Image: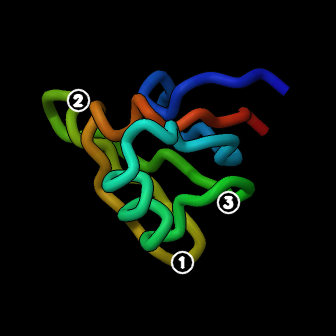
Amino acid sequence: MKQTRLSTLARGDVCLVAEVAPEHAELKSRLYALGVIPGSKLEVLRFAPLGDPLQVKVGGSFLSIRKSEADIIKVELT
């Protein structure tokens, strides 16, 4: 599967989390607590008017993630 960063996806894209960059330990811990863990399914729902943040669905939850945060999340398109 093709790997890319969550920040590069378009509205409606569905992907699986491959990796969250380990050098951002505090942010990685927060994302894990919110369900953004390797193997979890994400769906890009919408972008704010200026493109930042983006809203994603993970499990039954809706999250708003800044582009800078989305940039450390590697995903695989499904």
Q: Quadrant of the C terminus?
A: top right
Residue flagged by tag 2: what amino acid is it? Gly
Question: Residue 64 at x, y = what percent?
Answer: 29, 55
Q: Nearer the viewer, mark 1 or mark 3?
A: 3
Depth order, front residue of 27/48: 27
Give left or right: position of 70 versus 17.
left
In this rendering, position of residue 69 left or right of residue 33: left
Q: Look at the image and tell me whether residue 70 can be seen.
A: yes
- Residue closest to the eye, 43 or 31: 31
Residue 59 image-quadrant placement:
bottom right
The residue that mark 3 highlights is 40
N-terminal of the pair, mark 2 or mark 1, is: 2
Q: Amino acid at mark 1?
A: Gly
The residue under label 3 is which amino acid type? Ser
- Choose top left, top right, bottom left or bottom right for residue 58: bottom right
Residue highlighted by disc 1: 60
Residue depicted at x 40% and y 67%: 62
For label 1, the SS is: loop
Q: Earlier in the sequence, mark 1 or mark 3?
A: 3
Report x, y in % for residue 10: 49, 28
Q: Which residue is mark 2?
A: 51
